[in-house]
Image: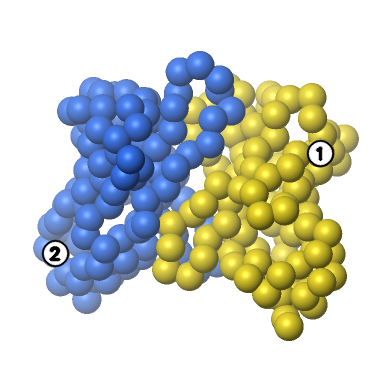
Chain colours: A yellow, B blue
Amino acid sequence: AQSVAQPEDQVNVAEGNPLTVKCTYSVSGNPYLFWYVQYPNRGLQFLLKYITGDNLVKGSYGFEAEFNKSQTSFHLKKPSALVSDSALYFCAVRDEGYSTLTFGKGTMLLVSP
Amino acid sequence: NAGVTQTPKFQVLKTGQSMTLQCAQDMNHEYMSWYRQDPGMGLRLIHYSVGAGITDQGEVPNGYNVSRSTTEDFPLRLLSAAPSQTSVYFCASKRESGARNTEAFFGQGTRLTVV
């Protein structure tokens, strides 16, 4: 079975400050990990994915994520937040033995001016 | 290249009515899926397909039917709508062959209200 947890319903950060959105996962095999962003009344947009061997993954809009196998985590980060980063962020996992993608419940990121 | 197209964008149904949510992709992706998004629940998988003629149930399949007669289309049928099916529905597709860590592409969603 595969599962993913996003422990924070909401993250608040001031513009210009670094941000972190947390994600932990559980799989029985090797994980394939993803981050997606959803703006209001829109579909999900792909941000970045974990590729075996690169623990620090860089993605769209200046976002990056750090894969930590011992802590089973894949936290999303950005060095300097923008107001326009305010959106709903989803972490997703796929066990290498499965076809389906399992999503977390989402974390609302609010960046204040 | 349109990507994943969902129709309609909005729909209101009465309890007991049936309808079909359409999903089409033009990327020749083998894998297609339907999710529902509810507040505080994230996205939950309803049904998925790994290729034409092959479908399987996800986490919340009850009350929904799917079929996959072509690679491009993956319609979701509500057999007898219930208020509990009020939700936002997303269709997604991804390439299955080749690299296994391919990302999914999502449609813009269908907002369904059952009264």
* Mark number displayed over residue A46: none
Q: Give, as a three-letter code, the residue at label 1.
A: Leu
Q: Give, as a three-letter code, the residue at label 2.
A: Gly
Q: Is residue B1 left or right of residue A104?
A: left
Mark pair 1, 2: CA separation: 50 Å
Give the x, y percent position of residue A37. Answer: 57, 57
User: Could one spot residue A74 in this view of the protein?
Assistant: no
Query: How many labels, in total?
Result: 2
Query: Do the residues marked 1 and 2 share a common chain?
Result: no
Q: Nearer the viewer, residue A73 or A77?
A: A77
What SS does tag 1 mark? Answer: strand
Give the x, y percent position of residue B19. Answer: 14, 56
Which mark is nearer the camera, 1 or 2? Answer: 1
Q: Nearer the viewer, residue A37 or B47?
A: A37
Q: Which residue ends up furthest to the right in the rendered image?
A: A70
Which chain does the numbered disc 2 sit on? Answer: B
Mark 2 is surrounded, within 10 Å at the Cα level, by few (under 14), some (14 to 19) or many (20 or more) other residues, namely some
Q: Residue at x 25, y 67 (%)?
A: B10
Quadrant of res B2: top left
A64 up-or-down from B51: above or below: below
Q: Is residue A43 left or right of residue B63?
A: right
Q: Residue at x 83, y 59 (%)?
A: A79
Which chain does the numbered disc 1 sit on? Answer: A
The residue identified by callout 2 is: B16
Q: Residue at x 51, y 65 (%)?
A: A39
The residue identified by callout 1 is: A56
Q: Which residue ends up furthest to the left in the rendered image?
A: B17
> Which quadrant is the C terminus of chain A positioned in?
bottom right
User: Could one spot residue B36 in this view of the protein?
Assistant: yes
What SS does tag 2 mark? Answer: loop
Quadrant of res B17: bottom left
Give the x, y percent position of residue A72. Answer: 79, 39
